[in-house]
Image (cartoon, rainbow, N blue to C red):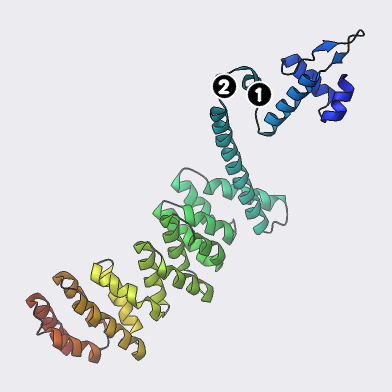
Amino acid sequence: MLIGEVARRSGVSTRMLRHYDSLGLVRPTGRTVGGYREYSEEDIRRIFHVEGLRSLGLSLRQIGRALEDPAFTPSTLVGDLIRRTEERLKREQELLQRLRAIDASAPSGWQDVLRTVELLHGLGSPFAARRQQAVLAEDLPVPAELLASAVLTEPDANVAGALRWALARTGDGVASLASGLRSEDAGIRRRAVLALAELPGDEATAALADALDDPDPGVRRQAALASARRGAPTAVPTLVEMIIEGANDVEAAEVLGTLASDPAVADRIITALTGALAETADSAARIRVTQALLELPKAAARELLAQLAHDNDQSVARVASALLGVLDER
């Protein structure tokens, strides 16, 4: 079969077939009297082998080795292809994020596009100071979606704080942050909660409520503190748990006191704290619960403190008696 017919049937151009010949990948078995390349069935089969390997992303050099070198194993080759494909996909994903960020900034001209690109380069810097400078640039409006994406992955506390501040100024980004709550990385979920805590609105409040069921204690605790500051009584169980465990217990007690300004919620808090006292024999935990009572409305706190002043645990009883004296001085 002559080269022209092979090209028509295989879809490989005559130019590429000649290139394959020059590289030794597919050399025609024979030549016609006139010197034209003549391909056998085996040659055509090899052409399809070459094209099949090209479709996997192999270079022509790799294809030559795959076809000729018995030691060039498929597992090694496929592993290398997977790695290079993952790297390419990562680059493509980064490009897509840049394009979306530019689109979200609603550029009115190429100058706006270049400014956004400059911001992206700044946020991608390996130096924390440079990233912070990019966020705080007054003359460069930052799209909320871009800020939300950056805050979810920012490891530096100072830069993260600047990002949350800038995001709060936009009043947007809840959807992007809420998606961070679904990440498998607990660190990303914690950053999402911290950022949501600084955003106003019912959507942010609802997202924080969802985070109260997070499997990571750190995420749950931050969500509980933020939810309680928004007046959500659903945070009470986690806040009581924080007091028992000694995790930000002073802060947890303070926000419980704020929630207790609602009589119905105050009753719920008293019930939860009473239950916690009944369920734990740990002296330090019981003392923390006793101290938390001082944050509650005076009447509710006095009744329970009076009971605890006669507690079997003398340390708890002494703390309760002392706190009763504090209440009397108020």
**Above or below for 79 versus 68:** below
- In which quadrant is the N terminus drawn? top right
Give the x, y percent position of residue 317. 10, 80
Identify which residue, 23 or 155, lies in the foreground: 23
In 3D space, how far apart are the residues under numbered discs 1 and 2 (Cα atoms)?
10 Å
Badge 2 local density, few (<14 within 10 Å), some, or many (20+)?
few
Residue at the extreme top of the image, as rendered: 33
The numbered mark at residue 260 is none
> Residue shown at 89%/10% (left/top)?
32
Q: Give the side of residue 14 with respect to residue 328, left or right.
A: right
Q: Which residue is mark 1?
A: 63
Identify which residue, 232 or 58, lies in the foreground: 58
Q: Which residue is mark 2?
A: 72
Q: Give the side of residue 91 with respect to residue 326, left or right.
A: right
Which residue type carries mark 1?
Ile
**Above or below for 130 versus 220:** above
Give the x, y percent position of residue 214. 41, 65
**Above or below for 128 versus 212:** above
Please count the marks in the image.
2
